[in-house]
Amino acid sequence: MTKRALITGITGQDGSYLTELLVGKGYEVHGVMRRASVFNTDRIDHLYHDPHLPGPPVRLHYGDLTDGTSLRHILDAVRPDEIYNLGAQSHVLVSFQIPEYTADTVAVGALRLLEAVRDFVGSRGGAVRLYQAGSSEMFGAAPAPQSEATPFHPRSPYGVSKLAAHWYGVNYREAYGLFVCNGILFNHESPRRGETFVSRKVTRAAARIKEGLQDKLYLGNLEAKRDWGFAGDYVEAMWLMLQQDVAEDFVIATGEARSVKELVELAFAEVGLEWSNHVEFDPRYLRPTEVDFLQGDAGKARQRLGWRPKTGFVELVRMMIAHDLDLARQERMLKGAGYAAPPRGAATLKQH
Ligand code: NAP
Ligand code: F7E
């Protein structure tokens, strides 16, 4: 029997890698997509295609985590075996600017989905397994290294909302016996990472500066430390969690922490530039409360899931730089040929 998966946030970084993984495993994949005024499927265009033609079984459904009715309709239509709740307003600094919306998507959105799943399981008698995308931001100010046993101390509306979603998951597991796994994932990046997260902002800028398309990169706090892994490795852990006999929560991390400054040094060195000639401080990128030091202990995932990261920090940064150099070169060539518009995904001089 072909397994059916439903992914919220399928158009995001993790959604695209998870779709690739599940299609490769023979799943029929359904995704919840938000309506936008422009196409927002860049990351999955290579997987999604005209449903009238043969090809990978990927289907998209309009819906939103702020709209419980849409989630219920999609559950009824898809009847999934596994659900991956990846949809979120996932930017920490932006969560200080739109805290209510962040809570509505991240915290109440998870609750809406759990309620819909509870009713779906109750009325249809089906077994559904749910993965909830939790975050190391829930640890916030808790001392490193952080594991499943570390008490939470979130430092942003995003972190607080993710923590509420985490506890909703635990509660629905205990109260109703739902199969819910909370993944507590530390930062994971890739060439598909959103351009306003620090890793991609840095690799994109280093590449564009190298190609003469910009001169400066404006950043906030360079001292914060993060445990950065590769998104492609992390989606495998999500899938593994749902294949266990018992639903549990797992920390997923590399166990190595680097500062933002180390990331910047490495990225600029990769393109043969001295970072200090190009990087400037802009207080706009500081957070009202910062998370200083995240370093995960993924020992439980190693033992129970047999999961370990395959991609190291240096390899990750090289992969991202190589991708962003390609984009920057395309942009430079187009400009040289008199085209004003940059290629899709190459973005503009704007720094968010
Ligand atoms: P991302 O690239 O920002 O993708 C977020 C996805 O959620 C996008 O598909 C987005 O749609 C969708 N979305 C936003 N608001 C929504 C709403 N109201 N209803 C339905 N969908 C909505 O995030 P990511 O890096 O792939 O992360 C995936 C999940 O893991 C998120 O929940 C994130 O908070 C969590 N997480 C990420 C990391 C990390 O380091 N990447 C670490 C821990 C946890 P659009 O494409 O239309 O914007
Ligand atoms: O910031 C510092 C910033 O925005 C990392 C999300 O995926 O991972 C991500 O959240 C660090 C912070 O990621 C800039 O202050 C300096 O200390 O790349 P980030 P994040 O906040 O760690 C967690 C696990 C998630 O769950 C989230 O969804 O870099 N920093 N200067 C900067 N950060 C940004 N974005 N931009 C700067 O200019």
Image: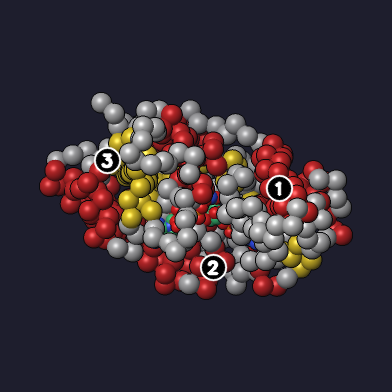
Does label 1 or label 2 sit earlier along the sequence?
2
Quickly name the residue at label 1. 330
State the image coordinates of residue 343 (x, y, percent, origin top left).
64, 52
- Residue annotated with mark 3: 80
Can residue 169 be seen in the rendering of this structure?
no
SS for callout 1:
helix
Residue 239 percent location from the top left of the image: 41, 35
Q: Is 250 left, or right, of 219 in this rendering? A: left
> What separation in Å lies between label 1 and label 2 (alpha carbons)?
30 Å
Mark 1 CB lies closer than 8 A to ligand 1: no
Classify mark 3: residues with Cα within 10 Å, few (<14), some (14-19) or many (20+): many
- Which label number is shown at residue 306? none
- Classed neighbour count for the residue bearing mark 1: other residues with Cα under 10 Å, few (<14), some (14–19), many (≥20): some
Q: Quadrant of the C terminus?
A: bottom right
* Badge 1 or badge 3: first in the primary sequence: 3
Q: Which residue is mark 2?
A: 94
Image coords of residue 202 (percent x, y): 71, 54
Residue displayed at 39% across by 60% down: 35
